[in-house]
Image (tube, rainbow, N blue to C red):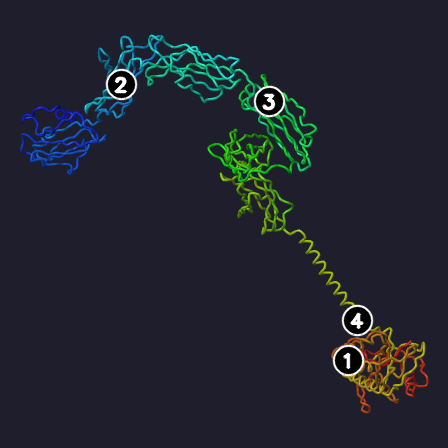
Amino acid sequence: MVSVFLLFLLPCLAPVRRVTGDRYHLITSPQPLALEIGTNFTATCTIVNTTEVTADDLFWNLTKTTVPKVQYTKVNSSALNVTIPIREDTPQLLLCLCKKESLYVRMNTAKFLHGIFLANGYPPDKPHNLSCIAVQDKSVISPTISCEWEARHRQMKNVPTLHTLFVRDTDRIYNVTTSTNKAQVTFNIFPNFMLLEIWVEAHNKLGQVESEHLVHYANGFVKTNPPSDVKAISEKILSSSLLINWTRPIASRYIKLIYQIRFCPRGSNDWIEVPLEDTAEDIHSFRLQNLQPDKDYISQVRCKYYIDFQGYWSDWSTNSTQRTPEDLPSGEPDLWRIITDDGTNERQVQFVCKEPQAANGRIIRFDIRLQDQKAKSRNWRGEWESIAVNGSDEGRRETRLLKEISLPEKKSVMVHVIAVNSVGTSPKAVMGIAAKRGEPGSVQGLRVWPHEGKLLVQWKPLNSTHVTEYVVEWAAGEQMDWQRESSLATRATIEGSLARFVCYNVSVYPIYNGWVGKAARVEAYLEEGVPAQAPEVALQGDPGRNKASLVWSEVPGRSRRGFITKYMLFYGNGDVVSAIPLAANATSYTLTALSANTKYEVWLQASTIRGSKEGSKSYFTTLKYAPGEIEGIVVGLSLGLMFIFLLTMLLCIYKRDVIKENFWPQIPNPGESTIGTWSPDYSLKAETPKENCLSGISVLDMDLCDAKCVFEEDKASLALKKDKYLSEEHSSGIGGSSCMSSPRQSVSDSDEGGDMADTTASTVQYSSVVASSGYKGQTPSSQAQQSVFSRSESTQPLLDSEENPDGAQEGSRTFQRSSRQQRFPHGKEGREDAEDGRPKMELQDVVEPLDFCPLEEDAEQTSADGLAADWLAAAPASSYMPQGGYRPQGSSAFC
């Protein structure tokens, strides 16, 4: 298909010629050779030799893209114009086609297709900066002239631009065409001293243009070789000059030359050129002056055509190196001191020195002399001391230690130093060190900051005519250097070699007629960076329960790499991390509000203006209890227990009777009691018992009686006793006390006037009355019914029922019932006597009579006592009866 399409285009792209009516029906015009980029192009498509189509049936394509109709212009019914802008990317094929779909058009496709080939490009640019040169070839000048120029490189493939170099002499014009920006023209021989005209012409399909014309003598285009055999000669009598000799590169019959000389100290890249006015002649030697003695210098020479100063200089010759002779030092030594004040009464002073700026030779020694100002009149001219100097690197002014002394604070000293070389001595350097309290004042407003790779130092001038100069000193670690500034200076640039990220202590000293004043100091960095390390955090002591004290050291000077602006303290327990900002000079901090028995991690972050650096992490664990907390708890508990113990002891002592009564009650021992019997008619008169009166105690074993009989008997006994105790203040129970005892207060007295607790130590008589009606089942005897009275005397305290007979009545009944059941298992109801109303009880068994001793009372015993005694003696032995509660009696006792 592509081949067929190209075959259709071949007649269209052919050059325009006369069109016959039987060949084409569409014709496009014009057919340009080239179109300038940036312009507009208008083409016309014309219909010929047919009426099948009109201009309305035509359209334009740029290769395969249809041109919009807005760019069309209808000329008439058979012609259609199109206008397109020409750009670098404009397609190169513009086609006119017919769009009617008739059979005639389809069968004659080639006749309804015509096109234009668009060759777009730029017109040629004017060449500029044309230059031509002819170089030396061995001992003559080469016959070839080489030219170069500049042109805009806007070459287009379809519209190439060519350049033609033209050289015209008096006889002919030489030309060379090229597509580049350089060309050469070769003569038979070089046209020395002939006038030449040279220019360049640029041309293409869109036009042509010429460069400026160069009109010079042919020698003006020559570049010779550099001078040869360049030598520098040192003259001993002239220590500041060198003689330079050379050989011309080409014979003068070919070209006349002028020369240029330059030189520099060895190791320097700053060349010094000799003015052309001094060398603008055809010479072969020159003397360099105002050089420094004893210094190596490098010299070079070059040449060019002497008439036209716009000609070509040759290359520089090879280096020629020579050292100037030595001379006397023209400058004084650079003397300085380093003072170390350790707080004692003496200062350690080191005197250091540099070679003079103009040493004019190698310094072989320094002579130093110290002068004590107080001994001025006696020893004004001190003794000189020589310090030998070892060899040093060329061009390097090393700092040398001359002497070290201990200078008292109140002492002043003047130092003189002279530098000596092989030729002679230098001027004398003088420096004075005043007493510590007599040092002159310092400068104010000192500032230091970095600027363009240097440190700038600025201070306020001192209003003193005695200030002769200023010394700017900078030190970092063990490195120290200084430089001197004039007395009028207020700003200086430190010229020494400074390193980045290093802290320098910059000091400015005013010099008062040789005496060093006080220093003003400030720290500065040439360039700051991120700290190389951060402080490591350590615990100060042991951590507490909810706080911990942290300490750290400052970042070492070399690791700071800048001014520390702040610290950031981080701490956390694994879940939450907290940060605390701290000042740049902080070295400790106490964390508070920590959790007990928790492990924490902590670290520091040091920051400068350039960034931050985190230190290594430290760990600690808080205590479960605060220091002293356990001791406080133990002491508190101990004191509490002691207080409770003491309080308990006091209560026990204060309530000992109550405690004793409740925990250790005194239970009556029947074996230690005296049991007696009594009857209502028994005499209440006290008896005087006799010692050892009781011969025996009989136990009365009674038959069973019902509970009512016993209860009634107890009630009768209580009533009887109450009547007896109310009738007489003191009673001895049955009428008197037993032997070896004195009358005691009765229970009735205690009930009326006192507490039973106060009489628990008193002897209590226990008594009971038992009525007998004979044995069970027997008829009572003819003798009058008799009542058996039993009594006992015990030192045991009364039971609760005895102390509170009324309140213990119910308990007494229970006890009586149980006792009666135990002692009278076969008890019967008692019978009451109709005459006296007392209950009658039958004696089951009489074991043994009771024997009572006669009372030892005096005449107060009543007849009733005797009757009672007789009755008791005559009565059958009675058994010990269970009681429904002990009955309190008058005081009595038994032996």
Disc marking residue 657: 4
Mark 4 vs mark 3: give the one in front: 3
Please give the name of the residue rendered at 59% of the width and 43% of the height, measured from the top-left corner. Answer: 587
For the residues labelled 2 and 1, the Cα–Cα distance comes to 163 Å
Using the image, tell me which numbered label, if any, was put on residue 419: 3
Q: Nearer the viewer, mark 1 or mark 4?
A: 4
- Residue at the disc numbered 2: 214
Q: Residues within 10 Å of mark 4 (few under 14, many from 20)?
A: few
Name the foreground residue: 443 vs 238: 238
Q: Which residue is mark 1?
A: 805
- How many numbered circles are shown? 4
Asked where in the image residue 769 lies, by quadrant, the reply is bottom right
Specify the farthest residue to the bottom.
835
Quarter that holds the N terminus: top left
Residue kind at label 1, given as amino acid type: Pro
Which amino acid, by three-letter code, is at mark 2? Answer: Leu
Quick one: 569 or 730, which is closer to the camera? 569
Kind of residue at disc 4:
Asp
Q: Nearer the viewer, mark 2 or mark 4?
A: 2
Residue 670 x, y percent position in the rendering:
85, 74
State the separation of the CA atoms marked 2 and 4: 149 Å
Q: Earlier in the sequence, mark 2 or mark 4?
A: 2
